Amino acid sequence: MSSVPEQDQLAEEAIQPVEEESDVEHFHWRVTKNLTRRIDQYLVDRVGYLSRNGVQRLIDNGLVKVNGRVIKASYRPRNGDEVEMVAPPEPVNEIVPEPIPLDIIYEDEYFLALNKQADLIVHPARGRWHGTLVNGLVHYGKKWSTINGEWRPGILHRLDRNTTGVMLVAKADEAHWRLARQFENRTIQKTYMAIIHGVPELLADVIDMPIGKDRFIREKQAVRKIENGGKAAITKYEIQEIFDSPPGITLDTGEHAADRKNPAPPGRFSLVKLTPKTGRTHQLRVHMSHKGYPMVGDTMYHGRVVNAGDFRFDRQALHAYEITFTHPVTLQPMTLQAPLPPDFQNLMTLLRKN
């Protein structure tokens, strides 16, 4: 075993290419000699922006493996070891303006409303520093409220990455806190349109089921009892239109292996209006899936991708269609609508063929 720690830095082959994901980076090294340092010290030298405490937390969470096995921070790498680490990406110091298209529905000196497109994260978080709505807002203008900090300028609320529709963004701090109070007091009414698998027995109903973090998958939410960490969640739904399954379509699972284990959803489809009374993460998606009527394309919550040859719908079919609130300065009631996006309209046209 080598007794010269300074030589440890030469005891590896070239770092493998880093695979970037939405919120993590994957590192991979192959050790070519026995080392005298602990694995946590070794990794701090390999990834300069991580502290030793940060590396130790990754190790404690099972995000560092040697030869495919979770190890302790005291482990000393040996010749031939394959070291893998999943870690947050290197943070950045400022938001970079990017010319991301913004579909502005309404704008005055106090706030604006926009129709968010699919495949767009609202604000930088968990390693995603580029390509977000905030990057586009910073490019669009410099006057945004600062109440939520420099990484979320003007952001009052959010939509999931692949949920489209109307969002409010505050320009002035006063407008921000007045609108935020309306959200907090639940006096803002939001209406969503969704296409779901199946037809509920009751064509209109209220779903009152608490929601909390899924016990097994970090990214997911689930119906949970209050005593098990769930929070009150209420959704009103109203079926607007019912479709038989048109000929020539297939229902595909998502890219993840776990998606193939989900049971097949009901055969018909429904256009449904959803009115949330609370604003829990993934609330509408979780409630409809739990009732047995997942949203088309929402493979995270048991939905399936609609494939019709040259047309493929592979995101959750959920659109924030309308928002009603009080103007933060004039105090006049306002209702703003965001037109359905083209892919949503195309899906409806396809389903109406039968």
Image: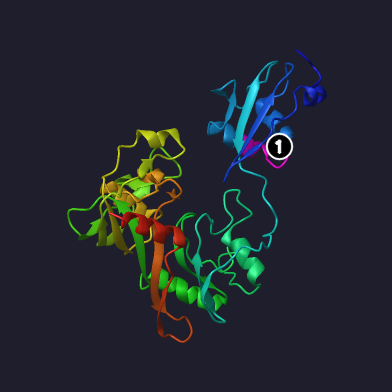
The colour scheme used here is: rainbow
Residue pictured at 44% horizontal, 70% vertical? 338
Q: Where is residue 105 in the image (x, y as percent from the top left)?
A: 50, 74
Closer to us: 203 or 211: 203
Question: Which residue sits at x=81%, y=20%?
Answer: 4
Instruction: Report the side of 68 relative to 347 (left or right).
Output: right
Residue 189 vertical placement versus 77 (above, below): below
Region rendered in magenta: 48-56
In screen coordinates, is 83 left or right of 318? right
Residue under label 1? 47
Q: State yes or no: residue 260 in magenta.
A: no
53 part of magenta stretch:
yes
Query: What residue lies at 80% left-to-right and 24% top-to-bottom?
Result: 10
Q: Residues within 10 Å of mark 1 (few under 14, many from 20)?
A: some
* Residue situated furthest top in the rendering: 1
Frontmost residue, 308 versus 277: 308
Relative side of 4 to 325, left or right: right
Does residue 119 appear in the picture of this structure? yes
26 left or right, relative to 157: right
Q: On screen, 87 above or below 2?
A: below
For the N terminus, the image quarter is top right
Where's residue 212, x and y in %? 36, 49
Q: What is the secondary structure assignment of the residue under circle 1?
A: loop
Inspect the image, locate mark 1, and give the three-letter code of the amino acid beneath it: Val
Is the residue 299 above or below the residue 114 in the image? above
**Residue 102's spot in the image, x, y percent?**
57, 67
Quadrant position of the C terminus in the picture = bottom left
* Residue 150 in view here: no
